[in-house]
Image (cartoon, grey):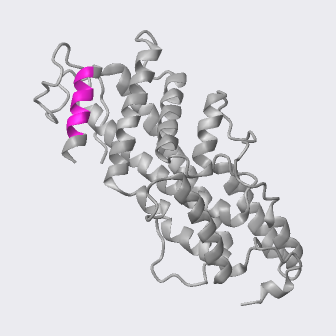
Amino acid sequence: MSSRRSHSRHSNASRITEEEINELVSKLQMMLPDAPIRRNSRVSARKVLQETCSYIRSLHQEVDDLSEKLSELLASTDTDSAEAAILRSLLMQ
Amino acid sequence: MEAESSTSNQQRKRKRSASESSEKPAQSTWRSDKEHRLYSSKLLEALRRVRSGSGSSSPRTDPPRSRAVREAADRALAISARGRTRWSRAILSSRSIKLKSNRIRVPCPARPKRTELERIQSAADQEKKKSVVLQSKAKVLGRLVPGCKKLSFPTLLEEASDYIKALEMQVKAMSALTEILSMFGGGTEGAPGMVQDAGAGTSTGTDSMPPPA
């Protein structure tokens, strides 16, 4: 690992080391849907960032679709019975 | 490792003062059942308000309404974060100004870190290409996560990981809600809480949606 600290001219307490970045990137990678268990430093940070972006985008898309479905459903269901059903199922979990 | 632990200690101290659940890192709470239930009830409340607010005369697939649902869900999600993360605060403050774009500059209460990405770049000339690529990716990421456009790289990554977990919970809660509501689609007039035929198919079938696989 390159000793970034000696290269850094800004010797503040808040300098970012490469290890930090790698650590965070690997943590991020764990959360992606198809995270390989045998995680090595082979996966570049760029790749992880890219997959993170597309994963967030797909999650946003899912939420949008669900919002659409929910708005349809909200218009057509009677609130009281639906709410009671929801509350009941929530309590049963 | 020392620098890493000291920064995370700082951030943990900040989180500790902000929230009462101090021991658990913020990440694990999104996965808990309690959080799920909390979010579901907030979501329900918000959705109820959406429903009563928009009246019954508008068509079902009103674009503003699905937008309102999305915003209500996001707001409930942000509230569930209990102010621990920047993206949640950004959602809450941007919604109150009634702006949908997440491009506005949210006055973050954190210290004004002048992008340390620039520091990375200046400090590592031989790895300039790598950091430029990272910076562009990070910028894209910063646009996706609300309120995180000008954060330092590690902070951005942390916000992103928390945001992803929260989004996953949001998706789970909303799909569960959708499933339940679709079972009771059509409405039973005048019989609150007395729905017996759960899952027996929508007899008063106004919705013809296939059950989510």
Q: From the top left corner, tell me how far across and down residue B80 is, in percent.
A: 46, 44
Quadrant position of residue B20:
bottom left
In this rendered view, identify the residue nearer to me: B107 or A64.
B107
Question: Image quadrant for the N terminus of chain B?
Answer: bottom right
Q: From the top left corner, tell me how far across and down residue B118 is, in percent.
A: 85, 66
Say above or below: B80 vs A79.
Answer: below
Quadrant position of residue B186:
top left
A87 part of magenta stretch: yes
Q: In this view, does B6 lie to the left or right of A91?
A: right
Please give the name of the residue rendered at 82% of the width and 59% of the height, measured from the top-left corner: B114
Q: From the top left corner, tell me how far across and down residue B81 is, in percent.
A: 50, 48
Q: How many labels does the image show?
A: 0
Please give the name of the residue rendered at 76% of the width and 89% of the height, measured from the top-left corner: A2
Q: What stretch is highlighted in magenta?
A: A80-89
In this rendered view, identify the residue nearer to me: B83 or A35.
B83
Residue, far top = B57
Residue, far left = B196
Say above or below: B165 vs A5.
Answer: above
Q: Is residue B89 visible?
A: yes
Give the main secondary structure of the magenta stretch: helix
Please give the name of the residue rendered at 41% of the width and 20% of the height, measured from the top-left corner: B51
B101 part of magenta stretch: no
Q: From the top left corner, tell me how far across and down residue B133 is, in percent.
A: 77, 68
Say above or below: A22 vs B109.
Answer: below
Q: Can residue A44 be seen in this view?
A: no
Say above or below: A81 vs B31.
Answer: above
